[in-house]
Image: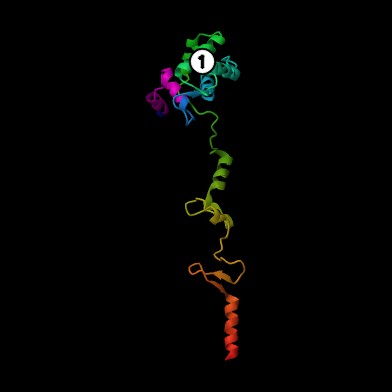
Amino acid sequence: MSEKEDKSAEKEEPKDLETLFDMFARFGDRESDGTITLKNIDKWLKQAELLDKKGGVTNADTAITFSKIVKNKKRMDLNEFQEFIETLANDKKVEPKEFTDKLIAAGEPKLSSVTTPITGGAVGRNLRRMTDTKLYTGAHKERFDEEGKGKGKEGRTDIQSDTGYVSGFKKDEKHGKHEDKDKDENEDDKKHKKK
């Protein structure tokens, strides 16, 4: 057996509706309190290949059945879900056990349409080269630290330490005094002329 088969053999899929209901209720839903939304029911039905042309159930069917059972609520509990499956199966003239068996066979929630990075070929080489901050030159090199992490605003703009609004004007931050270089020089010149 390969390593992948060993891992899949170790991790058994849940075999009961209650456990799967809880998993799908919580999948991508932080607010779940053990109840499930229509969105997650549709995901489960789609994963079980019931929500498509071949399965015979449409999103409109699930929405109508959902609203029949829970009225104005946005979630349903396990008992309401079992009633939902029974009603949906009867509407489609299918045995409810057949729907339940397919839902259990679907297993735990899986991610779909996940984009994987391109790592091979010319595109992968170019992508690695463009995202390697050690190869950057010029002004772009200054945007990253030694570890390749962005410096933020420090790396994009020159930050001046002057606090004045014209050259020669400086504000002494510690004492709150203002100094004007030109004024000091003029006073020095006047003292020298008087002597």
Residue at coordinates 55% horizontally, 30% vertically from top-left? Answer: 113
Way the structure is coloured: rainbow
- 184 over 102 or under it: above or below: below
How crowded is the residue under tag 1: few (<14 C-alpha within 10 Å), some, or many (20+)?
A: many
Q: Nearer the viewer, residue 62 or 5?
A: 62
Please provide percent x and percent y for residue 104. Answer: 45, 17
Q: 82 and 105: which one is in front?
A: 82
Question: Horizontal and vertical percent for residue 146?
Answer: 48, 54
Return the residue found at the far left.
10
In the image, farthest residue toward the right: 166
* Mark count: 1
In this picture, is 165 found above or below 26? below
Residue bounds of the magenta highlight: 4-24
Instruction: Look at mark 1 in the image and give the residue it sits on.
Output: 84
Q: Residue at x 57, y 19 (%)?
A: 63
The residue that appears at 44% across and 27% down in the rendered structure is: 33
- Identify the residue at horizontal 58%, vertical 67% (top origin): 164
Q: Quadrant of the C terminus?
A: bottom right
Q: Hey, which quadrant is residue 183 in on the image?
A: bottom right
Q: Quadrant of the N terminus?
A: top left
Q: Is residue 140 above or below residue 107?
A: below
